[in-house]
Each structure stands twice: as structure tokens, then as C-alpha cells.
Image (cartoon, rainbow, N blue to C red):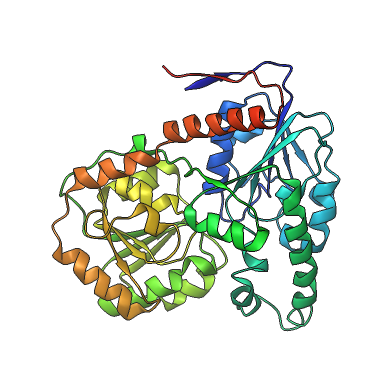
Amino acid sequence: MTSVIDPSLRIALASDALATAGGAGGAENVLVAMKSLFPEAPVYTTVYNPEKMPECMASWDIRTSFIQDLPAGKTKYQMYLPLMPTAIEQLDFEAYDLVISGHHSVIKGIVTRPDALHLCYCYSPMRYAWDLYHRYLNAAEVKGWQKPIIPWLMNYIRLWDASSANRVDVFVAISHHVQKRITKFYRRESTVIYPPVATERFTPNGQKDDGFYLMVGRLVGYKRHDLAVAAFNQNGRPLVIIGDGPERTKLEPLAAANIKFLGRQPESVVQDHLQRCRGFIFPGEEDFGIAPVEAMAAGRPVVAFARGGATETVVEGRTGVFFREATAQSLNQALERLEATSWQSGVISEHARQFSQERFLQEFAQIVETSLQIHNTPSTIRQLVP
């Protein structure tokens, strides 16, 4: 699918930090898809680290905030959180008729012209300020001297985050799970458009597998790799973990010999493991979860925690199984149910196709067109579907 855009409609894209230590994830993949709809649009962000991002971004017009030039700005930008609201408010969007932001931290707080349309594709209200605040506050990586400071800082951040939601004209949520949180924390309505998943890259291998279970994603606390490690330490089944992040140094020494950490791997290796695994382990509560949809596109069943976005993508007994308590015992009981079920890889794969990239591009282009019309902004976007 392509779009024809009148050059007179001035468009910009905006993203939270393009520098995540664990490498590109779902938000970055969505940005790449958006850029295909609006190839001439510059991309504004807080910081950009090309070493951590997809190669295609190297040719983009990426414009960063002053955080980029601060000491360790590209690698330890999180320590500049108190400066982030000011940093993104200083990004100049005066020239643009349409600004599309991809938000999970601060970027939706940008300032646009009164007559411009600001459409926010919301991955999540700021997790560490709202629903995961106490979990982050008590995380192992939080230093003792930081704990008395964080509550005061987060009080300011929450006030700014809630008030800056009023700068958005149209909210689009990545799942109904996120939609509910937008309503609760921002008191705003939103439309749900699931993010794009490259389902076409995967072909089911039927009943063939190499007997191992798989996890793919950044090794950060809320993804609950610790829960999977504890469960597989008990059950002794082979588990392969692909991805990197701050949790790896803590978890790897705790893992038994049946658990292998492969670190970051190229897409070809990830795809190969998804095709060959017996099942995919997804123990965290996430806003959507692209990796389990990729596993299902490859025809593999998923063991998922029964909260968050997974409840919108995994069908119990048809494409996977749920565990309802965040314990190793509950996960292992779900694993036993997966082992006892005869799965049809073709049915699982077909279910995943509804989350394809083509579907996302069509739905997103449509909501942009509709929003421009409602807000009386001149639009000449016309979809051309082959």
C-alpha cells in the first residue's frame, strides 16, 4: 500500500528516544511503518543513537533535543528525565500542519500550532509515573540515595504528563488495554489500532519443532524474564532467551544449564528460532506484545500471562494458553497444558494474520484522513491499494 500526499500538507513525525540500550523494539518498528506512509516527513526525538537503531534510520532527517548534546545523552538519557518536558517543548513544530507522535514517555507533550493537527499513537501512558510507579521505585537498579528524590520528581512528572495530554487532538491506542489507561490517567477518548506485525515473514513448519521454548525481547524488569528463569529452573526444559538489557547480568548467573542467553541477534536468527521452537513464553504484562504475535505467525503456541495486550491476541486453547498468577508454579502448570494439547500450526498462523503490517497501514492512513477532515485541516492523502 502507498499514499499520495500533496506537498502543501506539511507533516512531521515525533518519537520518544531512539536510543534504547536493548535495541529497536515495537515502537521503532511502528515508526518505520509510519515513515513509509510519510517518507518526506522529518523525525523529531529527544535523543538518537544510530548504534542501537535500524540502519534505515541513518538516511532519515532526524532532529534531536538538547539532551543529545549533554554528557552521555545518547546512552544514559533516562537520568535527564527532569529535563525532558523542557527539551521536547523546545522542539519547533511551527512549520507543520500535521504532527504524528509515537508516545510512551514524554513526546506527546510537544507544542504545535493551534490550527495544526496533533495525532498521538499511544503505546502507553508513562509507565514509571503511573501504574508501574511502585515497581520501578523498588527496582534493584534504583540507588538508595535516589529513593527519597523519586517521589518528588514523579509528582511533578505526573502533573505535567496529565496536563500535556490536552495538547493532543486525537489519541490512538495500540490496544484496548492501553485505551483503558488513557481514559484513566488522561481522561481522554481514543481509537484502537493494533500495531503492525511482519506476519508475512513467517511460514508454519507444521508439527516439527526442535523441542526448546523461546523468549524474545529486551531484558527489562517488567517483561518478567525472572519468572521464566525460575519456572524453567524447576521444570528442566530447554529455554532460549534472545535479547539484551539490564536484567541479563542479574539473571544469567541464576539460570540452570537448560537456559541459554543468546543476547541480541539479527532478525534472521530470531525468525529461525521462532520457526523451530516448541512454544513461546510471554510472562510479562505488556501493552500489546509483538513477539508473541510473530510466534503465532510462525504457527507456534504461546504461554502468556493473562493480563495486558496478550489477552487481545492469544486465544485460549486455540493459539496458546494463559497462566493467571505471576508465579513459577502457575507458569509451569500452563506449560503442562500446552504440552498436553495438539496444536494446529496453520490455524495459529492464520489467526496472527489479522495483525499484519498492511492492515495497520490501511487503518492508520484512514484515521489520519478522517482526523484531518474533522479538524478542518486540508488533506490530500489518498490511499492506493494494489
Q: Nearer the viewer, residue 29 or 267?
A: 29
**Residue at screen point 56% across, 50% down:** 23
Q: Residue at x 83, y 59 (%)?
A: 83
Judging depth in this view, the residue of 117 and 77 nearest the camera is: 117
Residue 50: percent from the left, percent from the top? 66, 42
Question: x%, y% of residue 280?
Answer: 32, 58
Q: Is residue 107 above or below residue 302?
A: above
How many numbered marks does the figure carry? 0
Can residue 73 be seen? no
Q: Looking at the rendering, which quadrant does residue 93 occupy?
A: top right
Q: Position of residue 272 (x, y in %)?
A: 32, 45
* The C terminus, quarter of image: top left
Could you tell me which residue is drawn at 38 percent across and 46 percent down?
A: 269
From the top left corner, tell me how far across and down residue 253 is, in percent: 45, 76
Q: Is residue 38 above or below residue 186?
A: above
Q: Is residue 385 left or right of residue 238?
A: right
In this rendering, the answer to whether 197 lies above or below 372 is below
Is residue 346 visible from the viewing direction of this image?
A: yes
